[in-house]
């Protein structure tokens, strides 16, 4: 059973990856929390059987467990639901040594993590990620928060968990589209950090798609290791952490322009990586040529991810450029990217809007 240590100074914790954790959670939770009161927060899709199994196993160990079920979906990352968690803490007279256990995807993890960061200026936090995206991305790194009506993730805090329990068994109830979408972030880790992992993905992508245990376990482990290594070197995103944004400059533009829920995050990032990879090929970098670009496209296609904007979604070039321009990463009229100079090596790049337009047209933006 792989464990990924995250040795942050003062806040070191472990990510456990394995099976059957929900029914056996107290063994991991007990040693890392201070008190005996737990607030278990989950969304409606996790209620049965996962939340019930987890609640029962923690209660059986003697924890006082209160549960809070929230609606599923991105709109749950709101002030209203944040307040619902604070209310539940206060009404149950939870004290400073209580802990919050977040069972869910990135939405519940981000929201509940921020509630844990803010209630009584910070209480213990345990993440039990249930989506593949949460296991490989959102549960690692300590970013928590909610959305503002004007922008996603505008309000939040860095708050590290005491423990992450990635129980691969829960992935069997995750809708297939969600699973496939997360493969984009896994492939991204290969590109930005680890050529060997990229090559492993090329060989094992079908196993991942089909949720074969050994393959999923390795992919989750390596993804967590890579994100943890990057975050350890740059917790507050002043430098290295920016490499995690590969595919996200143009990917976010596609995701946001398409409108809420039309293109999944990972699908948009897949198309974004294709467009940004092409940009780098155009720039003439020796270690990132048509050859590397073709390998990336082939791997994304083998994962069943989109590599072009789907024909039925008509996204105008002007809208996309405006969205990319308004991205916070931009300075001086140019658009900023994290781009590969070779498999596993990244650089910061500013490029003109004309260059962005060219590659966006290639991936199916409308004139
Ligand atoms: N904090 C970070 O560093 C970070 C990084 C990446 C993404 N995020 C955030 O993560 C969120 C996206 O996360 P997500 O993709 O997990 O979305 P999500 O939490 O909305 O989960 C996706 C859907 O799958 C359902 N689901 C999750 N696990 C399930 C399971 N095991 N069985 C059945 N259904 C299940 C959920 O109820 C939901 O309907 C976004 O809000 C994004 O901003 C945060
Ligand atoms: Zn992402």
Image (cartoon, rainbow, N blue to C red):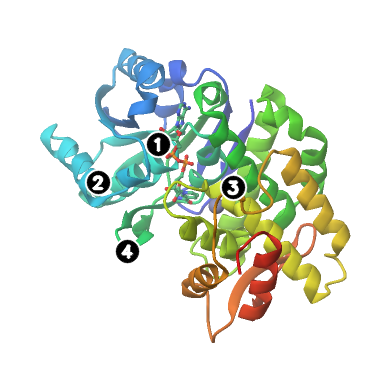
Quarter of the displayed picture in which ligand 1 can be seen = top left
What residue is pinned by disc 4?
150
Which residue is drawn at the image coordinates 57% and 65% (left, top)? Answer: 249
What residue is pinned by disc 1?
126
- Quadrant housing the N terminus: top right
- Quadrant housing the C terminus: bottom right
Q: Is mark 1 within 8 Å of ligand 1?
A: no
Position above or below: 212 against 101:
above
Cα distance in 3D space between marks 4 and 1: 29 Å
User: In the picture provided, is 171 more to the left or to the right than 275?
Assistant: left
If you read the primary sequence from the N terminus, does the residue marked by circle 3 or circle 2 appear first?
2
Task: State the image quarter where residue 66 is shown.
Answer: top left
Percent of width and height locating residue 318: 53, 73
If you read the primary sequence from the N terminus, does the residue marked by circle 1 or circle 2 appear first?
2
If you read the primary sequence from the N terminus, does the residue marked by circle 4 or circle 2 appear first?
2
What secondary structure is found at the residue carrying circle 3? Answer: helix
Q: From the viewer's perspective, is the residue at label 3 or at label 2 nearer?
A: 3
Q: Residues within 10 Å of mark 3 (few under 14, many from 20)?
A: many
If you read the primary sequence from the N terminus, does the residue marked by circle 4 or circle 1 appear first?
1
Mark on residue 267?
A: 3
What secondary structure is found at the residue carrying circle 4? Answer: loop
Cα distance in 3D space between marks 4 and 3: 23 Å
Cα distance in 3D space between marks 4 and 2: 17 Å
User: In the picture provided, is 179 more to the left or to the right than 296?
Assistant: left
Mark on residue 204?
A: none
Mark on residue 82?
A: 2
Position above or below: 105 against 352:
above
């Amino acid at each position: 059973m792989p464990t990924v240590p995250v040795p942050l100074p003062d806040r070191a914790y472990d990510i456990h990856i394995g099976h059957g954790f929900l029914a056996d959670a107290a063994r991991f939770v007990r040693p890392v929390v201070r008190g005996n009161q737990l607030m278990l927060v989950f969304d409606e899709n996790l209620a049965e059987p996962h939340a019930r199994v987890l609640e029962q196993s923690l209660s059986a160990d003697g924890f006082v467990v209160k549960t809070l079920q929230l609606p599923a979906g991105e709109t749950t990352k709101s002030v209203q639901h944040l307040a619902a968690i604070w209310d539940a803490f206060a009404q149950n007279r939870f004290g400073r040594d209580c802990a919050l256990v977040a069972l869910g995807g990135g939405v519940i993890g981000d929201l509940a993590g921020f509630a844990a960061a803010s209630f009584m200026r910070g209480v213990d936090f345990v993440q039990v990620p249930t989506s593949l995206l949460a296991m490989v991305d959102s549960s690692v790194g300590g970013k928590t928060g909610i959305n503002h009506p004007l922008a996603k993730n505008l309000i939040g805090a860095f708050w590290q968990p005491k423990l992450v329990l990635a129980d691969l068994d829960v992935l069997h109830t995750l809708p297939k589209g969600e699973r496939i979408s997360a493969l984009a972030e896994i492939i991204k880790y290969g590109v930005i950090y680890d050529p060997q992992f990229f090559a492993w993905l090329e060989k094992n992508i079908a196993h991942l798609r089909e949720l074969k245990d050994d393959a999923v376990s390795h992919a989750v482990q390596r993804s967590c290791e890579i994100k943890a290594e990057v975050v350890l070197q740059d917790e507050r995103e002043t430098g290295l952490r920016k490499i995690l944004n590969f595919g996200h400059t143009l990917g976010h533009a596609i995701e946001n322009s398409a409108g809420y829920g039309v293109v999944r995050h990972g699908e948009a990032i897949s198309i974004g990586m294709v467009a940004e990879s092409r940009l780098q090929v155009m720039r003439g970098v020796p270690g990132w040529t048509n050859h590397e670009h073709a390998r990336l496209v082939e791997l994304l296609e083998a994962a069943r991810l989109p590599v072009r904007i789907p024909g039925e979604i008509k996204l105008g070039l002007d809208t996309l450029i405006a969205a990319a321009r308004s991205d916070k990463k931009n300075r001086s009229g140019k658009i900023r990217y994290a781009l590969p100079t070779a498999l596993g090596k990244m650089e910061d790049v500013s490029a003109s809007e004309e260059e962005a337009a060219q590659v966006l047209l290639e991936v199916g933006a409308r004139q």
